[in-house]
Amino acid sequence: MDLEVKGVAASRNQPRLFSQRKNSLQQGWTSRSWAIQNPCLPVVPPLDLGSLVDSDEEDNFSEAPCGTMHAHLKPPSTLAWITPCQRPYTQYHLKEVEQDIIPEDLPAPTGKYKQKYEQYAAEMKEGYKQHIRRTAEKARATSRQDVAGSKMNEKCDQGEEACLDDLLTLDRKALLQQGYADSPHHIRSSTRKSDAETVAAEKKKQMVTEQMMIDHLSRAVISDPEQGLNTEEQESSHVPPDSERAPLRVRRRTLHETKIRTTSTLTENDLSQKVEFDGRVLSRNGRDACRELIGFFFTHDQSLTVYEYRKFGKNRTNVLPFIKKGIYSHQCGRRKGKQYRLGDFYTGATLTFLSCDHPSLPKSIKENTLFRLRITNIDQIALSSLKTASVEHEEDTASQEAQDRQVLLAIQDKLKEQLHKRGVRILTGLGKHFQHLDKEGSGLLEKAEFQQALKTFHLEVSEQDFESSWLILQGNGPSKNKVDYGEFKRAIFGEMNEYRKSFVRKAFMKLDFNKTGIVSVIDIRKCYCARKHPHVISGHSTEEEIKSSFLETLREACSKSDEVSYGEFEDYYEGLSIGITDDEDFVSILCTPWGI
């Protein structure tokens, strides 16, 4: 019974299996034979591009006909059966198919796309014109430098020709740093950095102001728990704990009931009448020169105080008193012995103090008799409002100081022509020369030593100008026979403004990781980036060539070959600043290679 059923089932399914096998064999034969007769790659049926209409109404592809595609359809096949020898023919056939499927009646481009294409073409033409203009200006600048160098070589004597040729090559290498001013400045990144720096500066000033208010306000009266009792009552009174009288700690206390004398009687109203200013120490010591100082001048008693904002690591900060609050006076110059007034505070003003009056100062500052504090920035709004409220009498010293400034400015104008192209070499060489003459390390030199230094570096200053400048500097200094050579350089050659100085200090503080005032040449090589120099972008020089030229000129300013001090770093950029008139060009020269 079971066998019959199985046999019947087998007999019924057998014709169906044979038919499937037969059909598969027929299909395999037909596809194989078709592949032999037509050795070309089969094509995927083309897409109907007419139906893919954009949603934009301006494109207006909806009016295009849909049946405009022409394609040669072939029977389907598999890619695995195509031999390698058939591929060149198939590629050619694919190109033929692509040419055929291009619609014949495409609509004309709309006005929007025409405008975009015209704008793109205009931008390309303008960019090409600017590129040609820049290359022409660079060629002119290099030709002018070569002509100027050849003229100066002709003027030199035959005996000094070899020496001056070496110095002029150093000048040319130093002038390569001015090329950063030609590169376009990134406005977006600079605005982001400036906004972040402004927020950080405001936060820092707020922290210093709060610390100053805490130090000088009369808070001891309110915070003392025994303010309502005299000392005698405090000793004699023995109040039992179960008394009806309330404990002293919860008793209501008023300010007029106190018998305690406080060291300070200042109120918030007194301390609000102030002018806030930023300052820096005039010193060749990098650690002292890079201190962040914030001072306050109070008009109610003509006193001042200075705080130092110190940063320990990344997150820890502290505000420490640098100069205690008190009434101070000028220690040198025309106003020597006179008390500081509101008119003495402005951007660029120099405040002088005696080191012995401030025992908490660092040892490096206390080594000198005087220390000078330069005001780098001041709150102009508060200054102008307080000046209108207070009336100060003008003295004869103001006119005398103005005459002294005019004399020094006349000398500086004469020397600027001599320092225009070789300012880096002269100022760095003078700083090195003065350090060599200063055997004692006091920073003071005599009159004959300054005269000899000017002759050594071929700087022409008339005898009358030198004598008048010496009298001015001698009156400003602590010694009658000697003058600080830093003051001499600032008076004779001038100095860059505080805006430029702030970027020099910022660049050095980025290099000085350990806050020692000295940076190794290895760290300078690591941090200096010449990728954005115009000569590197144009392909005239490599990054290594620009970097080596900078390090070679910087080493000429250093007394040691493997490290650079802050004074030497400042002298280098002081000399570079003489030939640059625009402040923003000088800022780009500093910000581009150092990334600040």
Image: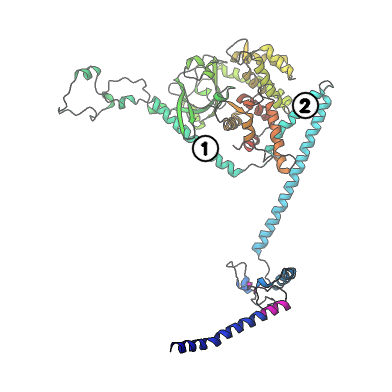
Q: Residues within 10 Å of mark 1 (few under 14, many from 20)?
A: few
Residue 31 in view, yes or no: yes
Residue 166: mark: 2
Q: Which residues are magenta?
A: 30-49
Q: Position of residue 84 (x, y in %)?
A: 72, 68
Residue 591 percent coordinates (x, y)? 62, 36
Percent x, y of residue 475: 60, 13
Asked whether residue 340 is drawn in magenta, I would say no
- At label 2, the amino acid type is Asp
- Tell me where residue 32 sits by quadrant: bottom right
Residue type at numbered disc 1? Thr
Image quadrant holding the N terminus, namely bottom left
Which label was assigned to residue 198?
A: 1
Mark 1: which secondary structure? Answer: helix
Q: Which mark is residue 117?
A: none
Image x and y of residue 67, in percent: 65, 77
- Labels in figure, total: 2
Q: How is the image coloured?
A: rainbow
